[in-house]
Every structure is written in C-alpha cells, then in structure tokens.
Image: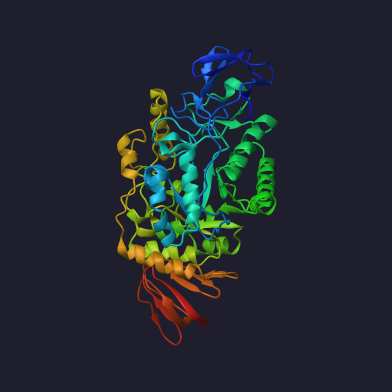
Amino acid sequence: MKHFSVWAPKASNIELVIDGVAHPMRRGNVWTSDITPVPGMRYGFRVDGELLPDPRSQSQPDGVHGLSEVCDPEFAWQHPWRGQQRSRIYELHVGTFRGDFQGVIEKLPYLQSIGVGAIELMPVQPFAGDRNWGYDGVFWHAVHAGYGGPRGLKQLIDAAHGHGIAVYLDVVYNHFGPEGNYMNRFGPYTVPNPTGWGDAINMADPHVRGYILDAIRQWFIEYRVDGLRLDATHAYTDLSLLDDIAELAAAVAAETGIPRTLIAEDLRDDPEITTSRGIDLQWNDTIHHCLHTLVTGEKHAYYKGYGTVQQLVDAINHRYHSVVYTTTHDQVGNRPRGDRPSQNLTVAQQLLKAAIIAAIPSPTMLFMGEEYGATTPFPFFCSHSDPALQAGTIAGRAEQFQDMGLTQPPLDPTDPATFEAARLDWQINPEVFAGYQRIFELSDQVQEPVKAIGGQRWIALLGAHPLVANLSDRPVTLPFTGELVYSFGSPEFTETHMVLGPWEFAFCKYLTCD
C-alpha cells in the first residue's frame, strides 16, 4: 500500500496510530492518510475511541488483539518456479505436523521421496492463542505469527518449489473466527445468516468481495501460492464469488505463465461447482463415505444412508472433477477422540482403502501420517483467550457429538494435552508404509478410462491397470483371471476364477472375466 487507508463506513471518527502516536485521517467510506507505510511500523486505527488492528493487516506479531505490522513485500526467492502438478496432494496441519513452517521445510525431502506433488496447508491466517485447526482465523491477508509469519510462509513456498512441490492454502471465506473479529466495527463485513460457525460473509458488498479477492491475488502474486482449497463453499452467501475467484485465477495464470488450482469443499455434492463455476476440483466426500461405511461398518451422522457396494460403484462412475481420499482432517477430527482410521483398522483394511482410491483416475489426497499408519489422533483443539468462548466450544462439541449419535466422552478441545497428543510422532508402521509406496507406484500409472463394477461384497475397477477388491471379512470367489501385479495378501488365481481373502485386493494385468 502507498498510503494508509481503511474502509470504515460505520465510523464517526478514525485516527491512525503509529508506534503510539495518533494521526488524523480524512473522512469518507474509505478513510485515508498521506503517511507512507514503512516496513516494521506497528499501527492500528482508533475507531470512535477504540484502538483496533487493520482488517487488511498482513502481520499480527502480537496476536489477533495486538497492533498490525507493515510488511516488506520484497523477498529473495531462491528457486525457480515452474508451475505444479496435483496428482498427489498431502493435507497437513502446520502445528501438529512439525510445529511451524521451518519444521515443514525440514520434511520436504521426505515428502518429495514419497511422490507428493502438492502440500495443502490447513488455514494459516491468524487465530487466537497458539493452538487451533485454523478455521477460527481472522485477518485474511495475514499469516499466523506462531507458524513463522509472512516471511516464514514465503520461505516454505520457496523451499517447496525447490523440491518440485506445489503449495496450496486452505482458505476460509464463509465466516470469521469468534475472537479477534473486529471487522464489523469498521463496516458491514457480515450478514446475520447463521453458518454454524458464525454470521455469514456479506459477499454482496463490493468492498467485502474486494477484501477477499485482494487476499487471493496477494497469495497468488506476492506469495507464489499454487492453489487454494476453498472451505465450505456451500456456506457462501453468493456463489457468483466462485466465478470471480476463477476469473482472477485465470488472469493471474495468464499474467505469470503459472497455472493455479482451485479446489472446493462443497457439501451439496453438486457437479455444477466444477462444470459451470470455473473451479478445477471438488473434495469428493461421497466416495469417501461409501468406502468408509463398507470397511468400518459405521452408519452414524455423515454415514447414514451409505453402505452398499453399488453406491460406491455409482459414486466412482459418476464422479465429477474430484479429489479422492481415504480420510481428511474433518473425517478424523469430527469424532469425540479424534481417532484415525489407522487406530481402528487392520493393515489389510488400511491398504484396501488406499488401493481403491489409488485405482480411481483422479487426483488423490493423503492426510498427514496416513501413509505410514500414524496412530496419533487428530481431535479438534483451540486456545481462545476468552473463558466464555472456551466453555462454549467445549459444550458445543459435546452437543455436536451427541447429535451425531457418538457416545464416547469427547476430549477437551481447550486442553493443551489434546493438541500435544495430535502432534505426529513419526513412528512408522513398516507394513503400512511399504504398502502405500507400492500403491503409489501403481497409482502413477492409472489413467482414464476406468469403469467400476461390483457385487454384494466386491468391487472391480477395470482399465489399463485393473483392481479387484474384497470389501468384506470373508473370502470371496470371483470369475476373474489374470496375472497378479500387487496385493498385500495372497490371492489365489486359477484358470477360471480368483479367490480374495478377507479385505484383500489385487492389482492385475491381463484381467479377464469368465
């Protein structure tokens, strides 16, 4: 920014406060000053007597209640930026993965070695305290100081590009977090439409829409971010914002020669998001839910109405432009104990799920630690400074689980021990890790067309690299023959059929059906 300014149509009087000194501002919907920002300045706006951070702050070194800091946009990029792939995405939470951006940098050689094409960072915008999933973020142009702030994020992106890995940001534009949300003191950033997490964002207002689009342009241009995961787009008050985001991404790609990827999470399961809105991909929870219920037998909450092989067959054959996965942060964390599938399933069941996902010719996503059978949980956690918010979060989570039909006593999301338990311990299960590596190799060869077929207890994905899988705890005899390429188990092949043991799968070649 060339001069300090702030959109504040609600204010009667505003002063710019820099390093403790107040300066008058010129009145208007956008209040302005002739003072030029200098990197390192600490500043805020005194709005009708109350000193507040800048809604467009790029740095909050003292947290969401502190003064804003002017950032230096210059950065000495060290690695060439050639664009990105998206065949294997790795979703991670910075704090529990390795603590901060530098910790993630230290694991980039490992991620490169397992064929990760992109890391998807759970939200990194500032939040209250030092522990949070990130979806309680505020200040959508800023980076959480505890992770390393703006410079730390740029260092991570630069290092990732040096390892041939793209960086996607998970961004939340459907609500503001409950603490540090001073936005409505300035202007009508929200409207009283409940989202489940707070009031909805006033996307009809051009200033609010500009606030979002300017943040996206900043991530793409200044930070060299390769893509965005758009959280809960079903809670957007105006879906035409997706059109604007897609138009911006296309313009930036044309300007820079670097493609950008847009991924939506939308619980409506509506193909229109990708076919008509310019969004590249959607998280496909339908495939996840079908597979999860078949392997675990769980039928609560998310999983009501799922549980047949035919549903999985149909979900695969009629999928939209999808990201597919065996689990996500939501599917792990929205459980009372935050238990991962790997804490409840056998190695055979874990690899069965991974094999089916790998045989679908869509970009796949791993949730951090999945690839080695991590047994550290990932429950929801937060560290609000307001005791009332803490108590409300505890009660709200307990009520949510009760409504979902989950009866286990939930972990206290505000207890530091809950966060500590979620830190990856990197205790690798060698059987799971080796199985995933072989499945990754085969996944890289999967391509369209693939057709799914199935019976009561089995599914087959037919294509150039076919897979046959037993989705039950009993052996199944199937009228397929072929040559085994890989299985975690020991399937039997004869001239007329194959026998798959419980939860067994077989990647084959020369597969025929008698």
Question: Image check: 482 left or right of 241?
Answer: left
Question: Image check: 114 left or right of 36?
Answer: left
x 32%, y 49%: residue: 376
| Quadrant of the rendering where the N terminus is positioned | top right
User: Compared with residue 15, is residue 133 higher up or lower down, i.e. above or below?
Assistant: below
Q: Nearer the viewer, residue 226 or 502?
A: 226
Q: Nearer the viewer, residue 454 or 342?
A: 342
Residue 39 in sight from this viewpoint: yes
Q: How is the image coloured?
A: rainbow
Count of marks placed on residues: 0
User: Compared with residue 208, is residue 368 higher up or lower down, i.e. above or below?
Assistant: below
Q: Nearer the viewer, residue 195 or 44?
A: 44
Q: Nearer the viewer, residue 396 or 210?
A: 210
Residue 457 in sight from this viewpoint: no
Residue 355: percent from the left, percent from the top? 45, 66
Residue 496: percent from the left, percent from the top? 46, 86
Residue at the outermost bottom position = 495
User: Compared with residue 210, is residue 83 higher up or lower down, i.e. above or below?
Assistant: below
Residue 64: percent from the left, percent from the top? 47, 27
Question: Image check: 46 left or right of 398?
Answer: right
x 43%, y 67%: residue: 439
State which quadrant residue 449 falls in.
bottom right
Residue 367: percent from the left, percent from the top? 43, 53
